[in-house]
Amino acid sequence: MVFWGVERYFWVAFCLLSLVWFNEFELQQNAPVINQWFIFFSGLSAYTYLRLPVFFSGLKQKKLGFVPFLIFSSSVSFFLFLLLDRNAQIWSIIGVPFILLYKIPTPYRVLGIKKIPFLKIFVIALVWSIWVVPVAFGLGFSNIFWTRPFVAMFCFCFAITIPFDIRDIDIDRKNKVKTIPHLIGIRASIFLSLLFIFLSLLLFDLDWDYRFVFMIFIFPIIALSGKRRKNAFYFSFCVEGLSFLLYCLKFIFSE
């Protein structure tokens, strides 16, 4: 379980990094290598940190194997943070509290931002967007040309997060965490996810051939995510992998 979890977090961090590569096309500039490594390792440490409530819940002791990995990834992230330019550091400081307060480690119950009704999906989309646009490229507040890619990325991240809320609808109900599927139902949530995908594709600087091909892939993946019996591998590889697919197609169509 420990090794599977670590591998999954590497995959999530890689998908996060692939959105940075995608935005290099969008912004027509390269993200500094230090910023890219910071995003990768901070993604690892963030997702490992969010597993701490499981560590403290008195379950299998072998799950404590995640703790050394958390210490390592967090230490590397902090070192890389010191090497970032000022703008990237400021944006990181803005985003980190959302991560730390998202799910506060406790062995008793779910606490933190996640507990606030319908808010967690907005926080996830916001943090991912901050990381892959202003943090990745060290963009200043006065540099408004990043706002369109930022809003587009927020819509994209919002859309691919909804399937996970659908998957966890019973768990969230048990933990008294209210999400969008609880409010509008599964079918309407799938429609909302596809709507936000479409909005993101309209906002991205893409040709229509690209949009058409991407929608061919993403429509069935999002639609099938409504079937909650899909295993964890499906969501980890297919749904989270849409970030990598977005970059791959952009790379292909840019040739």
Image (spheres, helix red, strand yellow):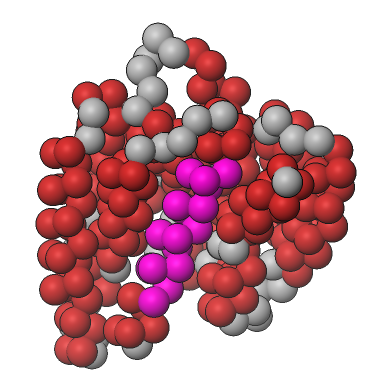
Q: Which residue is drawn at 53% across and 21% down?
A: 147
The residue furthest top is: 142
Observer-nearest of 132 and 186: 132
Using the rendered image of the protein, determine whether residue 195 is visible from the camera's viewpoint.
no
Where is residue 239, by image quadrant?
Answer: bottom right
- Residue 171 in magenta stretch: no
Observer-nearest of 103 and 152: 152
Where is residue 1? Give x, y as percent.
35, 87
Where is residue 124? Give x, y as percent.
45, 46
Where is residue 58? Give x, y as percent.
18, 82
Decide whether the magenta segment is chiefly helix, strand or loop: helix
- Residue 18 in magenta stretch: yes
Q: Residue at x 45, y 52 (%)?
A: 17
Q: Residue at x 56, y 62 (%)?
A: 240
Where is residue 226? Give x, y as percent.
71, 66
Where is residue 33, by image quadrant?
Answer: top left
The residue furthest front is: 255
Residue extent of the magenta highlight: 7-22
Q: Residue at x 86, y 44 (%)?
A: 209
Using the rendered image of the protein, determine whether residue 241 is visible from the camera's viewpoint.
yes
Q: Classify 254 as above or below 57.
A: above
The answer to whether residue 173 is left or right of residue 58 is right
- Tally the marks: 0
Where is residue 63, by image quadrant?
Answer: bottom left
Observer-nearest of 145 and 93: 145
Q: Classify 190 as above or below 11.
A: above
